[in-house]
Image (cartoon, grey):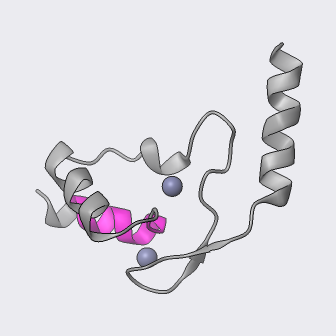
């Protein structure tokens, strides 16, 4: 089961198209693994995450998440 998970993650990573950040226009890859997107690991205040989710339909690049985190404090 563990090896199947790894295989699926590899497939999703390979087939993943880069996303364009809605906030700054940079290209970034979201959802790098099958277990979830790295952006969920970024520590954001709950209100900031909610606000971003209302504002943008996709994830933002790491730079914008970092900036949102700083601004949200
Ligand atoms: Zn960005
Ligand atoms: Zn993401």
Q: Residue at x 47, y 51 (%)?
A: 39
Disc tally is 0
Task: Name the image quarter holding the C terminus.
Answer: bottom left
- Up-down relation of residue 3 to residue 30 (above or below): above
Residue 60 point in image, percent of width and height: 44, 67
Q: Please indicate whether residue 43 sits to the left or right of residue 24 in the image.
A: left
Instruction: Provide the residue span drawn in magenta.
Output: 60-69
- The one nearer the camera, 67 or 12, is 12
What is the magenta segment's predominant secondary structure? helix
Q: Please indicate whether residue 51 sits to the left or right of residue 34 in the image.
A: left
Asked whether 68 falls inside the magenta stretch, the response is yes
Asked whether 29 falls inside the magenta stretch, the response is no
Task: Name the image quarter holding the N terminus.
Answer: top right
Q: Please indicate whether residue 14 sits to the left or right of residue 44 in the image.
A: right
Residue 8 point in image, percent of width and height: 83, 36
Q: For residue 35, which quarter of the picture?
A: top right
């Amino acid at each position: 089961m563990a090896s199947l998970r790894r295989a699926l993650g590899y497939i999703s990573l390979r087939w993943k198209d880069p996303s364009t950040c809605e906030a700054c226009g940079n290209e970034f890859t979201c959802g790098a693994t099958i277990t979830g997107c790295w952006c969920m690991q970024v520590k954001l205040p709950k209100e900031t995450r909610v606000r971003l989710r209302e504002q943008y339909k996709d994830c933002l690049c790491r730079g914008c998440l970092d900036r949102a985190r700083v601004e949200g404090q």
